[in-house]
Amino acid sequence: MDSFRTNPASDRYIDVDSDDDQDVVRQDGLYTQEFLESFELGLPPVDHARIEAATRSILEAVGEDPIRDGLLRTPGRVARMYDELLSGYRVDPQKLINDAMFDVDYSDMVIVRDIEFSSLCEHHMLPFLGHAHVAYIPNGKVVGLSKIPRIVDMFARRLQVQERMTHQIADFINEVLNPQGVAVVLEGFHMCAMIRGVKKSDSSMTTSAVLGTFATCAMTRSEFMEHLQRPRTRF
């Protein structure tokens, strides 16, 4: 018996017995409201007026004069800064991928390592910065190289904790590519632990997330970690 599903983009029914049609259904499903909400995407634009007013209030609360020369334009700068630092909430995942998924007939590990990222700790709204290492094992498809760093940035450019960011990157790649496995390792330096509180400037944090083959096969995990131990190649 033939099976059918609704295409959310057009409300038409698609025969999903063929592999090509199943791919269409899968891609349509990635951009539903449920998908966006699951990855905290599609938030409204930053409210500049409210941020500017709040910044003036903070300046006054710490004893500063928000209308002196050096601070007069600071509220506006801060509001525009949040457009950039929190842009990950407003990325269109369909435009990010931009059809850069390609059919392949191999299943060798793909690794993109040493991806620089910067994010904001949601507890103190101070930066944490570091490098991400991402690997996946294709299951008939690969994604364009530049898309992996863009995915990292999408989840870094928001209020975050490193542990959640690590899993969000892995889960998103898993949803988009449906690979045999995904592994993500993040190494971060947190300003909230370096310039305040405990003040440990040399401390860093490492987090990992493994799905599929990376979770079930110790040899696959070991291969990935061995790649990360190799010296970085400089261009």
Image (spheres, rainbow, N blue to C red):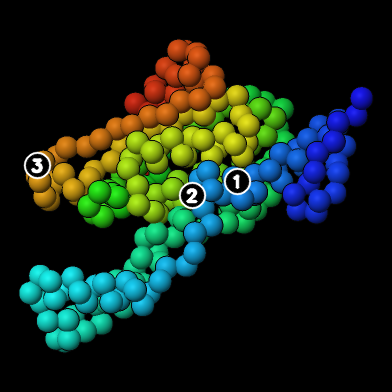
Snapshot quadrant of residue 10: bottom right
> Circles 3 and 2: CB distance less than 8 Å?
no
The mark nearer the N terminus, 3 or 1, is 1
Residue marked by disc 1: 34
- Amino acid on which disc 2 is placed: Glu
Quadrant of the snapshot with the N terminus? top right
Residue marked by disc 3: 198
- Amino acid on which disc 3 is placed: Val
Q: Position of residue 57 (x, y in %)?
A: 20, 74
The mark nearer the N terminus, 1 or 2, is 1
Picture residue at 54% right of the left edge, 19% below the top: 213
* Secondary structure state at the residue bearing disc 1: helix
How far is disc 1 from disc 2 in space, using C-alphas? 10 Å
Residue 40 marker:
2
Picture residue at 26% right of the left edge, 72% below the top: 54
- Amino acid on which disc 1 is placed: Glu
Packing grade of label 3 (10 A; few <14, some 14-19, many >=20) is few
